[in-house]
Image: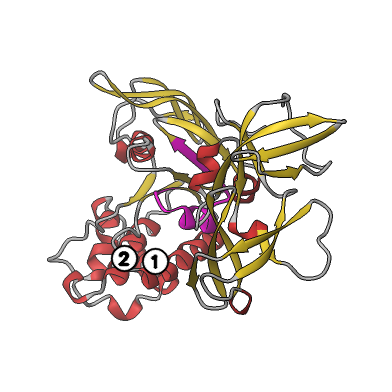
Amino acid sequence: MARVKISGLHKHFGAVPAVRGVDLDIADGEFTVLVGPSGCGKSTLLRTIAGLEEVSEGTIEIGGDVVNDMRPRDRDIAMVFQDYALYPHMTVERNIGFGLKARKLPPPEVAKRVKRAAEMLGITAFLPRYPRQLSGGQRQRVAIGRAIVRNPRLFLFDEPLSNLDAQLRDGMRAEIKRLHQEIGTTMIYVTHDQIEAMTLADRIVLMRDGVVEQQGAPLELFERPATRFVAGFLGSPQMSFLPGRLLNGAGELRLTLGDGSLVLPLPQAKKLGGAADGQNVLLGLRPEHMTRAHGEPGQGVVRYDATIELVQPTGSRSYATFRLAGQPVIAELQAHDVGRPGEKLAIDINLQRASIFDAGTERTL
């Protein structure tokens, strides 16, 4: 296992910056997920850690060693790629053990490590088969097994599940999570899928345009996003954003939405740093911040009579779309609480859980 420390990292492709001034300190044994939209620099950052791309500026340390000038094979890492990269003419057993044989480990040791990796991943029965005889999920297990047998100090995963269908992805996510809990090796994982990031990570590093937008524990980013971008990227369906203005009258902070026809009192618990009277803001509401009204509304909860426009059932829960101050908003409700499009429904909005962003900077207030 190894601590990974990245300081002032820049990577340019000609005049185009791909990674700009990234600082990360990944603890020994931590599972860190680099996530963000396509082109944000997450895969480039991973490839610089692996040594597949040269660093333009800054340093990378693995286990206390600066590895900027080290060849990939000398960094003691194992990388799992999106496309499996298996040898089609070799059996599963030979694919898994190939790297060990290349390092001239004794055959009994190779056989022992291959057997253990196959047992951990549930692919012992596939050892005599060839990659063409396996499903996509089985091939990915073989690729992970080939990485495991090396006992590296660091695992790198580059979108390993993106070629799998939804059901296989769910199963493989669980396998990778279980694998990390069992072996405890430091892992850095790249994905564009925020569900993978939330379910796998000890820490999420959310990137945008080559920089780190925010990093922290999954729930920290989800519940306390630093910017509108973070709030909108994490969560499905994503957060709804409503333009408004802060009003400070008679010592009470209030929020007026849209044309001013809807004024919401902000609860005392909602502390807004640097907020000013008349400031233009965005109110961020997640689907789970709203419920069907039952009984009296609690503290910090505002009741709203909504007209349902669209219902999207997902099983035990349904997503109901309605308009708040002229803007579409999605609420996550119990399946039997929704009603039909066109019906009126009393919705409780929990403003204590809402986020408020400065409309200009898009940073959280």
Of label 2 and label 1, which has the lower sequence position? 2
Quarter of the figure with residue 145: bottom left
Q: Is residue 197 magenta?
A: yes
Q: Position of residue 36 (x, y in %)?
A: 42, 43
Magenta stretch: give its range.
Answer: 189-207
- The amino acid pointed to by label 1 is Arg
Query: Which residue corresponds to the image point at 43% horizontal and 34% vertical from the top-left?
Result: 208
Cα–Cα gap, marks 2 and 1: 6 Å
Q: Residue furthest left?
A: 89
Query: Which residue corresponds to the image point at 87% horizontal and 31% vertical from the top-left?
Result: 250
Query: Which residue corresponds to the image point at 62% horizontal and 61% vertical from the top-left?
Result: 306
Observer-nearest of 329 and 187: 329
Q: Is residue 79 magenta?
A: no
Position of 301 with respect to 196 (left or right) is right
Q: Position of residue 19 (x, y in %)?
A: 38, 28
Mark number displayed over residue 164: 2
Compared to residue 39, the image places residue 124 above or below, namely below
Compared to residue 343, the image places residue 69 above or below, namely above
Residue 202: tell me if it is visible: yes
Observer-nearest of 321 and 176: 321
Q: Position of residue 68 (x, y in %)?
A: 37, 26
Check whether the beta carbons of the residues at disc 2 and disc 1 lie within 8 A of each other.
yes
Query: Which residue corresponds to the image point at 51% horizontal and 45% vertical from the top-left?
Result: 232
- The amino acid pointed to by label 2 is Leu
Residue 30: tell me if it is visible: no
**SS category of the residue bearing label 1:** helix
Position of 342 with respect to 110 (left or right) is right
Q: Which residue is mark 1?
A: 169
Position of 120 with respect to 101 (left or right) is right
Compared to residue 86, the image places residue 44 above or below, namely above
